[in-house]
Image: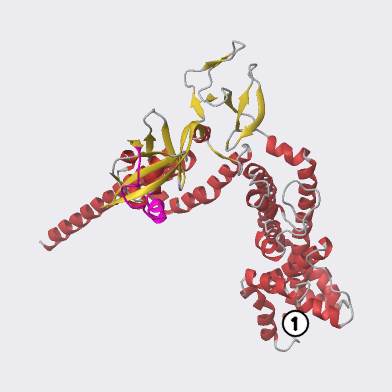
């Protein structure tokens, strides 16, 4: 009897677990379905697709018994797709576009922006006053050259009420004005009332007795305005007989000119009667595919090619020297603290590894103060001994030297830790045999220690090279890439690495952020670092064999 009750209890528990699992899965699907629809409606198709694929796959993996084993590795795979593969693919896709600070919108949004433009027509401007009739009711009194018009008392919604309620459509209603003479029938409301009801005042349209429409153009002004552009959805025929069938044809209502989207530059431009683009493009621009243009700019534009090659060479030198200096210092110090005759080895080990425990950004900022050209302790020492103060931040060579000094300080403890562990694997018999042959400490170090350490260290050194190749934090906090390269058409400095150069192009460009060019450079960095990773993998396999 007890056994039957136990079976029933287990079945009930399994049933509850199944219901809970399906309930949670349903909530996840509903919430993410809503998120996908909202992202798609907002034009973020790539992110909507990513969410749909990851959530759909996750629900299938966790609910299907056939994929039971995969549910343990799915979170890691999903994280890799969301935070590595997708950003990489998205960056590469941006590299083939003109996406920049001036070309952020889609073609539809850029067209809608131009259609919202207005221009003043005959009728002039009117000064207006907001008359307070009490109980949240107001009248508009407009004046121009001694002629006045007034509205009927009406309710105005505040900016907050208009934003949080469904009154936005009612706020856009036409308000008829009638001629008025004499003094104002009510006291004038203070300016704060106009500010508090600005959204409603801006949305409404005032209609004069002659049919002229007025809209708010300032805190105290209403003016007659009309849309600057008209959307010609049915096409247009130029004077030369050329038929235009572009779905985004805009006609300037003030001049009669025809404007079309230029799919090469990413801007709307006027066209002449021969359907040829003339004049400059009108901001804001829109995103278009430019093919290999950004990659060709890197290779052919002198203002980009020169700085890019200079920065690339410095990046390789910086990474190689950082690895070489930290390895040399770390290996020598590791051998010294492992020396049996050295007293207090534990204390020295702790002190030498201690810089590794300090966060890198703190150490970098400390060194930035030490190397200060006017008040830094290092330049004070030079001045104390009668030497000229080095210009650490204005001389390209000294700035690079300073960076290598700081990075060596930050990196040598890591090499000490590696070498100390690997030294334990070297048999003592080798050193005893070499001592019998008359070899000294230096010969032992060069002939035994270094060769035996280099083989297992090689993959780690390649990884260290790849890390320093993209050492963004050091450059950003210490020099910010300065001093700048003279003649560069993009923000580029003599101490920039490729990664910091990419960041400055993307976010610090004086002429606007150029995400497309930054994406092309980031793609080049990925290929270089990817090649290093493949080399690392190959060497690791060789090491195992």
Query: Quadrant of the image for the N terminus?
Result: bottom left
Looking at the picture, does residue 412 appear above or below residue 17? below
Q: Residue furthest bottom?
A: 343
The residue where tag 1 is placed is 339
Judge whether residue 58 is colored magenta.
Answer: no
Judge whether residue 191 is colored magenta.
Answer: yes
Q: Secondary structure at mark 1?
A: loop
Query: Quadrant of the image for the C terminus?
Result: bottom right
Q: Residue at x 72, y 73 (%)?
A: 427
Q: Nearer the viewer, residue 189 or 2?
A: 189
Q: Nearer the viewer, residue 270 or 1?
A: 270
Q: Residue furthest front?
A: 182
Q: Where is residue 286 drawn, in percent x and y?
A: 57, 35
Q: Nearer the viewer, residue 176 or 354?
A: 176
Q: Nearer the viewer, residue 217 or 537?
A: 217
For the record, the magenta segment spans 180-197
Label the magenta part by its dominant secondary structure. Answer: loop
């Amino acid at each position: 009897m007890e056994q039957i009750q136990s079976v029933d209890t287990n079945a009930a528990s399994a049933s509850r677990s199944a219901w809970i699992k399906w309930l949670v899965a349903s909530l996840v699907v509903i919430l993410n379905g809503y998120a996908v629809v909202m992202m798609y409606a907002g034009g973020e198709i790539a992110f909507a697709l990513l969410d749909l694929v990851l959530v759909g796959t996750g629900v299938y993996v966790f609910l299907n018994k056939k994929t039971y084993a995969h549910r343990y590795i799915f979170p890691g795979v999903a994280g890799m797709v969301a935070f590595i593969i997708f950003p990489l693919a998205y960056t590469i896709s941006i590299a083939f576009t003109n996406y920049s600070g001036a070309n952020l919108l889609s073609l539809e949004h850029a067209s809608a922006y131009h259609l919202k433009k207005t221009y003043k027509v005959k009728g002039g401007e009117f000064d207006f006053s907001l008359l307070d009739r009490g109980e949240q009711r107001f009248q508009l009194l407009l004046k121009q050259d001694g002629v006045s018009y007034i509205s009927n008392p009406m309710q105005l919604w505040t900016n907050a009420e208009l934003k949080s309620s469904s009154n936005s459509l009612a706020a856009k209603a036409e308000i008829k004005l009638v001629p008025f003479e004499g003094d104002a029938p009510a006291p004038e409301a203070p300016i704060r009332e106009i500010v508090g009801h600005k959204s409603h005042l801006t949305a409404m349209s005032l209609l004069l007795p002659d049919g002229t429409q007025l809209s708010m153009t300032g805190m105290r002004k209403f003016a007659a305005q009309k849309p600057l552009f008209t959307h010609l959805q049915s096409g247009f025929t130029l004077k030369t007989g050329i038929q235009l069938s572009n779905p985004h044809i805009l006609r300037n209502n003030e001049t009669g000119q025809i404007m079309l989207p230029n799919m090469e530059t990413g801007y709307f431009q006027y066209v002449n009667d021969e359907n040829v683009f003339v004049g400059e493009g009108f901001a804001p621009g829109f995103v278009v595919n430019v093919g290999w243009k950004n990659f060709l700019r890197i290779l052919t534009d002198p203002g980009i090619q020169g700085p890019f090659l200079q920065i690339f060479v410095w990046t390789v030198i910086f990474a190689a020297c950082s690895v070489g200096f930290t390895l040399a210092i770390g290996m020598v110090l590791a051998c010294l603290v492992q020396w049996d005759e050295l007293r207090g080895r534990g204390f020295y080990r702790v002190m030498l590894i201690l810089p590794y425990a300090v966060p890198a950004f703190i150490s970098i900022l400390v060194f930035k103060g030490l190397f200060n050209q006017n008040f830094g302790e290092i330049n004070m020492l030079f001045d104390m001994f009668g030497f000229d103060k080095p210009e650490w931040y204005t001389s390209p060579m000294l700035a690079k030297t300073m960076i290598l000094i700081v990075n060596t300080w930050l990196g040598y403890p890591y090499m000490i830790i590696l070498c100390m562990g690997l030294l334990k694997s070297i048999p003592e018999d080798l050193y005893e045999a070499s001592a019998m042959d008359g070899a000294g400490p230096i010969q032992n170090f060069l002939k035994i220690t270094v060769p035996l350490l280099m083989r297992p260290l090689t993959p780690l050194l390649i990884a260290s090279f790849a890390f320093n190749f993209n050492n963004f934090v050091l450059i950003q906090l210490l020099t910010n890439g300065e001093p700048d390269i003279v003649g560069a058409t993009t923000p580029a400095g003599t101490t920039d690495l490729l990664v910091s150069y990419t960041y400055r192009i993307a976010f610090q460009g004086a002429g606007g952020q150029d995400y497309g060019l930054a994406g092309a450079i980031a793609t080049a960095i990925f290929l270089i670092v990817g090649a290093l990773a493949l080399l690392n993998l190959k060497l690791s396999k060789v090491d195992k064999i």
